[in-house]
Image (cartoon, grey):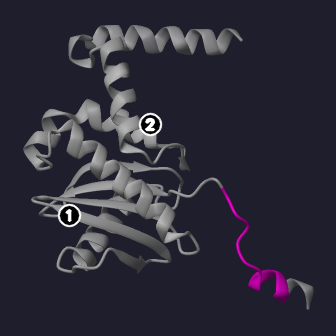
Amino acid sequence: AGGAMACLSPQEPSLYTVKAILILDNDGDRLFTKYYDDTYPTVKEQKAFEKNIFNKTHRTDSEIALLEGLTVVYKSSIDLYFYVIGSSYENELMLMAVLNCLFDSLSQMLRKNVEKRALLENMEGLFLAVDEIVDGGVILESDPQQVVHRVAVRGEDVPLTEQTVSQVLQSAKEQIKWSLLR
């Protein structure tokens, strides 16, 4: 009888609240995706999930959906759809805080021009912003001012546009070499 009760107990609280962050265009095609666990381990499964999520949400005005056993919060802007995904027992307000922080950060970085072309021209800022907000599924920051500030500081450190591919590869080789020598 104890095993049956264990199944009914509420999920243990976890810092790993975010399963994925997605940005899709108005055709439902991916512009940015970051999955933090292996709920959808292959690109094929991810894209099927993205199509499903887009088909279920792009014509509705609500902000929250339950889909495939996951909690999905979302919002759209012009030709972009933003999604933050957590497990079914996740607090929607926490996921919404991540979504709003991402959206408001991008809105500031793109000077309120949150649309596909502007986003594609500022992908490195998007990657930096997402990394400031969520790391490995753990929410780190929900204040867009802090995110925008940190992205600006990190952007000044090394302008990604000036870094050549060979420099990036060399840096990666060095990091791998040092991690192997430890």
Residue 114 spot, x, y in % from top left: 15, 49
Q: Earlier in the sequence, mark 2 or mark 1?
A: 1
Q: Magenta residues?
A: 4-14
Q: Quadrant of the N terminus?
A: bottom right
Residue ID for mark 2: 132
Real-space Cα separation, disc 2 to disc 1, in angstroms:
21 Å
Q: Of residues 4 and 125, which is closer to you in this image?
A: 125
Could you say where residue 21 lies in the image, as x and y percent from the top left? Answer: 38, 54
Q: Are marks 2 and 1 in contact (CB under 8 Å)?
A: no
Q: Residue at x 25, y 11 (%)?
A: 164
Question: Where is residue 79, by image quadrant?
Answer: bottom left
Between 100 and 67, the one lying in front of the other is: 100
- Which sits in the foreground, 136 or 103? 103
Residue matched to label 1: 76
Secondary structure of the residue carrying tag 1 is strand
Give the amino acid type for the residue marked by disc 1 in the picture.
Answer: Ser
Residue for point 24% across, 70% down: 54
Q: Nearer the viewer, residue 93 or 67?
A: 93
Residue 166 x %, y %:
30, 9
> Which image quadrant: the C terminus?
top right
